Amino acid sequence: MLTLPYNDNNRVNYALIFITIDVNNEWIIRFYRNDVATRNTVKRIPFLKNFSKVSPLKIPCPEIHNDEFMAYKTIHGEHLSIYEIEHLDTLSRVKIAEQLGNFLKNLHNFSDDNINFPPEYFMMVRDYYNSYPKQIFDSLDADERKIMDNKFKAIKNNDRNFITPTAIIHSNLHYKNILWDREKKKLNGVIDFAQVGLAITAMDFIQLTNFNTHKNDQFLKDILHAYGKDEVELFTQIKELSILEPLNYYWWYEKNNMPEGMEKIIMKLKTILHAQ
């Protein structure tokens, strides 16, 4: 089984599991809002403490925690943006790619017995025909459905997507969870490990480039060069899996009863499908 969408038993509303407070720009306190948040966080705190000792980028390291909240020192920096990366000079862009590649290489090779479970993430078995909602299928025309089916066939036919997961992944590595120093043009840290778990490594790359076009392909290749493993095959696998990013957002909007967001994602999907 691949860590992908879709299983109602695993659908967790992460927007509602924490209340986050910034104290004097020095401490972050996250209060658990329900039992799911408490249970999931308790599993991950030992891992965060262990990995923070070797991570090449700063990560949250809980210094105070109990059954109601956890607190860690603030990681300073601004949220990274793919659009800012696109406008950087080549040397700065390569340096950031190297930082991301080295961080993921360290994370994916890190072993911790506390993480022996998959991410609380949408799951998909190999039957790709049941892998995206009927609302999306009904919104696509015949050509778009054909392209979508071909994408899921590519996922289904790649055995690398269905290996037994042995690597710890962040599983929510989008740009709002990556902090950087805009003036020095370097990364400061990675945050929000609420969904960390065992899964295939390719899933940690699918939000690190703009998959609507091919103009950011080189940035992804630079990340993989620093990552240093199966560069060509992994690039192909990531590009195949990239269709899952908008689908995950669709399910999040659906879970939170946000029809405008669902419609926005359908339009984004159409743009992606026509850009291929």
Image (cartoon, rainbow, N blue to C red):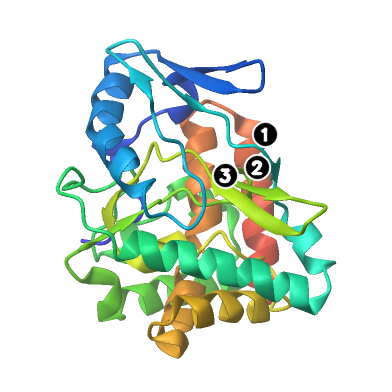
Dot label at residue 17: none
User: CB of mark 2 within 8 Å of CB of mark 1?
Assistant: yes
Q: Residue at x 78, y 78 (%)?
A: 90
The N terminus: image quadrant: bottom left
Q: Secondary structure at mark 1?
A: helix
Q: Amino acid at mark 2?
A: Glu
Q: Secondary structure at mark 2?
A: helix
Specify few, some or many for label 2: CA neighbours under 10 Å numbering under 14, 14-19, or 20 or more: some
- Out of 13 and 73, give the one closest to the viewer: 73
> Where residue 66 sits: x, y (%)?
29, 14
The C terminus: image quadrant: bottom right
Q: Is residue 18 above or below residue 46?
A: above
Dot label at residue 177: 3
Question: Dividing the picture into quarters, in which one does residue 70 lie?
Answer: top left
Q: Secondary structure at mark 3?
A: helix
Q: Is residue 114 above or below residue 15?
A: below
Determine which residue is flagged by label 1. 260
